[in-house]
Amino acid sequence: MSSLLRIIAQRLLLGVLTLFIVSIIIFTAVNMLPGDFAQAILGQSATDEAVAAIRRDLGLDQPPITRYWVWLTDTLSGDLGTSFAQANFASFTGSETGGGTTVMAQIAPRFENTLFLAGVTALIAVPFAVGLGILAALFRNSAFDKGSNMFALTSISSPEFFVAYILILFLAVLNPILPSLSNIYEGMGFGERLQKTLLPALTLTLVVTAHMMRMTRAAIISLLASPYIEMARLKGMKPMRVIVHHALPNALAPIINVVALNLAYLITGVVVVEVVFVYPGIGQLFVDSVKIRDIPVVQACCLIFAAAYILLNLMADILSILSNPRLRHPK
Amino acid sequence: MSDVLLTIRDLKIEGRSDEEWMPIINGIDLTLHKGEVLGLIGESGAGKSTVGLAAMGYTRDGVRISGGSVEFDGVDLVNAPLMKKRALLGKRIAYVAQSAAASFNPAHKIIDQHTEGPVRHGVMSEGESARDAMDLYERLRLPNPEEIGFRYPHQVSGGQLQRAMTAMAMSCRPDLIIFDEPTTALDVTTQIEVLAAIRDIVDQFGTAAIYITHDLAVVAQMADRIKVLLKGDEVEEAPTREMLDHPQEEYTRSLWAVRSFKRPAKPVPAGDATPVLSVQNVDASYGVTQVLFDVSFDIHQGRTVAVVGESGSGKSTTARCITGLLPPTSGVIQLDGEDLPLDYRKRSKDQLRQVQMIYQMADTALNPQKTIGEIIGRPVEFYMGLRGKARRDRVAELLNEIEMPPEQYIDRLPSELSGGQKQRVGIARALAAEPKFIICDEVTSALDQLVAEGILKLLARLQDDLKLSYMFITHDLATVRAIADEVVVMKDGEVVEQGPKADMFKPPHHPYTDLLLSSVPEMDPDWLTNLLEARGRENIGDAAVGRMDD
């Protein structure tokens, strides 16, 4: 058991290190964006003085290393900074910049929405994909297997917005079951919120199912030639039991890893679906902030995305380790 | 009511290779009575396992029964619907596989896998079956029968797992058990306890069995009748004693004769001769675990030293130390009286050339992408500096040396060779460096007896022609008898005894050597019975090895 804890501690430490390196990359990349906030907000006709004033006010005139250091230390102390866009233009009047919204306050509700959407999607997609994968493995090479493979590949190969519009067509327009707009807001009841989230969640389910389903199928099938599977068959076990009870527990590690990768995608890559359904998630905020060079928000979003990836992969690693009885029960 | 349990008539089985169905079994008849044990023997590829599985109405993927019938107690297993077959499998016909370590599901506890059959077939409740499991574990003389089932397979040793698998096969009290090479993967001392356990329990419950093995001496202990297979055909069948005393067919007699190969003794080297290779007081560790303790022995020119011992005794580790792959933590390794650098990276090309190795698994030791000419040509070029025509000529010469005509084989890939031919290529590759000393690591243990004998004879001839010295790692004492000049017995990383072969096979010797020697099955069908009486039931296998440590 102690070796297990050591492995987990090691992975955690590596995760923190990765996050640190990613923060450097984020900062460098964001700073390489052409133009800056001052230019973006003032437009073509800006005077050099006005641009300089805003830069000075926001600290953009400091050398990059200093700015990185300030950002890093602030972030570590839990302060993600103040959004430029909301920072008001106090600099014009020379008054204090205190009236701005913090990045935290801007991101938090959006991130919560994103997590809600990702959570609902995961609850539908993971059991659906794994179940489909198991059935495909059970009836491999049958029409069902081929059909579900085709279905999964078709939905992953179609552009997300296309899948979204098809679903809207069938579930909102032709059969008005679900609302096509996901304009959720704070203080909305859970039921209503869930209803409004369902259509984007179904769209994303179609997008992420293929990977998980095909990995489940492949991982199980790769085990079917093992002697212990033959043994289970020779003990007269039914095919379903052979697959679920004998093959699946040994196929968990690769499945967990693909699930984690797709969950990370649900948090970081769903901007198109958000736009289609006008869902107020973190993806839209991110794109808007890039457009106006609102650097603190962009950086915070990137950091959250990176942390989500690292954390989910870390969890996948740990769960894979736990799924191995050799590590859970050493000699 | 007849007491015939299983009848196989004119069974034909085909396997698919490259979209074509090729025959594997060409019409075999087999009759098994209740409570009878039938031995099925033959070399690899004879179709023993295929017949064994077909007796359960089961074929592996890519294999099909193309003709004939398999009838178990009135049920036609070839045409029975799957449901009906499943109701018999595990319940009335059970299977014991070659590798228990691979055939137990690593994700579940042993006892849960044991009770699965009885519970699912509705024979016993889970609690009843678990209690029964403990009783079976005790009958099979497993240590801690109350507790051992609650472990995972990887927490239990190979010999114990094999017995737990036999217990699992017994869980529904079947009428028939198929044993598919159940002791092949085990050490000789462990093999005995598994053999004894299997024989006793089959006897106690009056279970009929088909016992599949390639080892004649083993089948002689277990079977009432023996059937010999060759490439999918039956050679002959007879009661065990009759078969052993009067084999009718030429092929059967050749199987019997394999173990008779023996080299004449060589003259003892002069006392002051410098050994080709000298291992002196070598200690070695994997990480913090010390695995070799003060290992010393010499190998003289033109002689073979057999290093014997069970798995984990440090034989292969010693070879890794000599080749420099695992630098010893202390000690000296000398070639022709001169110290070799301990790390192979510090050795000169010439020093590297002098020590060559032949591996156990010729399959994995040859690069599957290279032709035989390239595989042998590489060391010819690297060590001897030959190129172009000179290199080709030398490769042809080496192929002639291993009795494989170059025009026929030089452009083939390893996948186009048989197991024995691959091993010959491994030998040619070692010879290409023109070494003084070759380490042979279990080079015959993956081969059939007849093929193995061919390899041993080839190695012996090469030794005479080229004055080679061999270190021959093996766990098979028959091989030792055949080719060794000196024997080094290892146990737990230490040399427990060494000396000329003649002395080793003559008492008195170290008790561990004694145990090893007496554990090798003999053709005499009463051998196991006599041995168990002589040693006592409690003094076989792990228990006997454990006693050595006191």
Image (cartoon, rainbow, N blue to C red):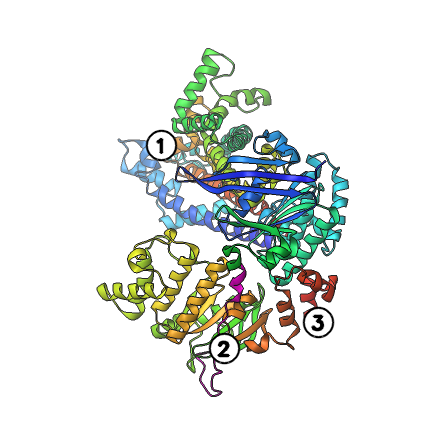
The N terminus of chain B sits in image quarter: top right
The three-letter amino acid code for the residue at tag 1 is Lys
Q: Quick check: A54 above or below B525?
A: above
- The residue sitting at 24% across, 67% down in the picture is B390
Q: Residue A291 shows which numbered tag?
A: 1
Q: How many marks?
A: 3
Point out the stretch of residues depicted in magenta: B256-277
- Secondary structure beneath dot 2 equals loop
Magenta residues, dominant SS class: loop
Where is residue B523 drawn, in percent x and y? Answer: 61, 61
The three-letter amino acid code for the residue at tag 3 is Asp
Q: Quick check: B329 above or below A221?
A: below
Where is residue B99 drawn, in percent x and y? Answer: 58, 51
Q: CA distance from mark 1 to mark 3?
A: 80 Å
- The residue sitting at 53% across, 56% down in the picture is B252
**Disc 3 marks which residue?**
B550
Q: Nearer the viewer, mark 1 or mark 3?
A: 3
**Disc 2 marks which residue?**
B265
- A77 or B187: nearer the eye? B187
B105 horizontally vs A309: left or right? right
